[in-house]
Amino acid sequence: MSPVLTREEAVAFGQRLLGKLSARANGVFLEQNVQAMTKVANGRILSATDGDSLSVRIDTRFGRGYGFVLGTNQRNDQLLDRFIAQAHTLELPKPPDAYPDDPDDPLHQRYVAQPVPEGALWYPATVDAMQGARADTAHRVVKQLVASKMTGAATVGVSARATLYIYREGLTAYARETDAELTVTARSTNDPASGWAGQARRDWTQMTPDVVTATAIDVATRSRNTVAFEPGRYTTILGPAAVAQLMRAMAQLFSAEEAALGRGPFAAARASNKRSRIGERVIDSRLSMYSDPDDPMGGYPAFIQEGGGYYGLPTYATQFIRNGVLVNLSEYGLVRGKPKSCSELPYSAHVTSNMPAVSIEEMIAGCPLGIYVNRFSNVSLVERDSALMTGVTRDGSFLIRHGKIDRPIKNFRFLDSPMFALNKVEAIGTPVRAAFGYSPPTGNELLWIVKSASWPPIHRSQQWPYAPMVVPPLMIKEFNFNSLADSM
């Protein structure tokens, strides 16, 4: 049995709502999230929570009106009538002759019936894991930590989500998806050393909890007795988690609108007459980046979920960078009745290479002097035009000498840009989907009533489960570490 609305249930519910709403409401958006979360802290089970939320948004795109969000977990007619009555009281009055509803408004044509693929994002095994496997995994993590004489923290999260956009004009877009993530931090009881490992998959059967926990324990064991090392520019091997944290922040910069206004790293030079750097090489020619709803590792619902008046329209695979050359930016608008790109910004990112993959062990063996970084934390954008970022290494940083791990070192703060770093690549590994770990909802996510212009409250790449980021480990020349950082 599905824990979220099936297509038939969601469509029937949406049609019932449309039938009860005033004519000014041309569409309904439904999102149901069911999440099961178990947390481990100090080597023991801390909490196990299960949540089920259903959000309903009424869309008023024509004439003068604003969309708004009301949340409910109930679907019976009596409560729906109360819900609709409350919705009607929130409608702003429409002044006479101001923004009249035009039958020829292109919005009416935009939302006509058209095929929207559902995608293959649903895995029954992940739904089953919400019960037995989730608890069993948490206990196994604790058992491994205790056996290794370490303490630590972990999060086992499993989710199911159903989304529907339905319009009076005929457009119906539905998706049902599952996701799962495990992150483990192991810490020595008599040393501040720590190690981290994580895994994210839509299909629970592809999860390997024992391997994730063993990796975190191994990194923590090898991180004992850290020593300070002088900050500077070093050849640096970034694990997939570290690369993903940079690319996750960089993905928010692929905006054609910003580039046309002369902002961001993809804006054209002021002396040129171009709107952007499309057609120019922006990163290493061995690297490409795309976003595809049908990507087995980085897929997502095949309709627009972000921004301005295009919710629910079908999306298509978009190549953003091909062999180092910028070929697309995200841009709202229609071309021959289709969206110009997948969404306001890349919902997911898959970074690939046209060269044979090099393992992390081979990268280390080929490095005379350098730094290995397991992951970063607190990555933030410092300067938008150059994509300059800062953050702190965490849970496993090592000095490399003569092709071998020499010793664990204290954490650094870095100050660098992916636009610089991705032009100094020396070796590229095999892409994997990265885990980010669970973060609680922000205050914006908890708002029940918002204007349509600010829905969703934040980009979906910032909500858990996070948008898939599929990236390889990279070996980068002269990555900039500008200071030492306290252990975190």
Image (tube, rainbow, N blue to C red):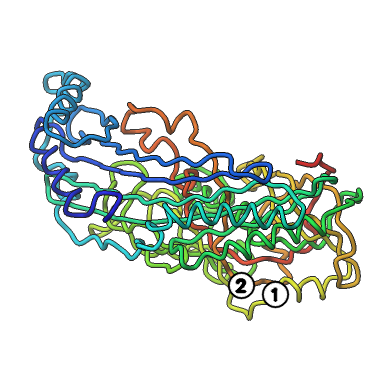
Q: Do the residues bearing badges 1 and 2 touch, measured as CB atoms within 8 Å?
A: yes
Q: How many marks?
A: 2
**Residue 353, x across and y down, in percent:** 59, 73
**Residue 339, x across and y down, in percent:** 31, 55
Judge whether 304 appears above or below 457 on screen: below
Q: Is residue 271 visible?
A: no
Query: Is residue 487 toward the left or the right of residue 358 in the image?
Result: right
- Residue position marked by numbered label 1 in the rendering: 359
From the image, which quarter does the N terminus lie in? Answer: bottom left
Disc 1: CA contacts within 10 A as few (<14), some (14-19) or many (>=20): some
**Residue 364, x across and y down, in percent:** 80, 71
Judge whether 268 appears above or below 391 on screen: below
Judge whether 214 appears above or below 86 on screen: below
- Residue position marked by numbered label 2 in the rendering: 430
Name the amino acid, label 2: Thr
Name the amino acid, label 1: Ser
Disc number for residue 140: none
**Residue 45, x across and y down, in percent:** 59, 44
Q: Is residue 52 visible?
A: yes
- Closer-to-camera residue (383/462): 462
Query: Is residue 74 toward the left or the right of residue 221 in the image?
Result: left
At 47% from the left and 66% from the top, the residue drawn is 297
At 80% from the left and 42% from the top, the residue drawn is 487
Query: Is residue 135 toward the left or the right of residue 233 in the image?
Result: left
Query: Is residue 4 toward the left or the right of residue 319 in the image?
Result: left
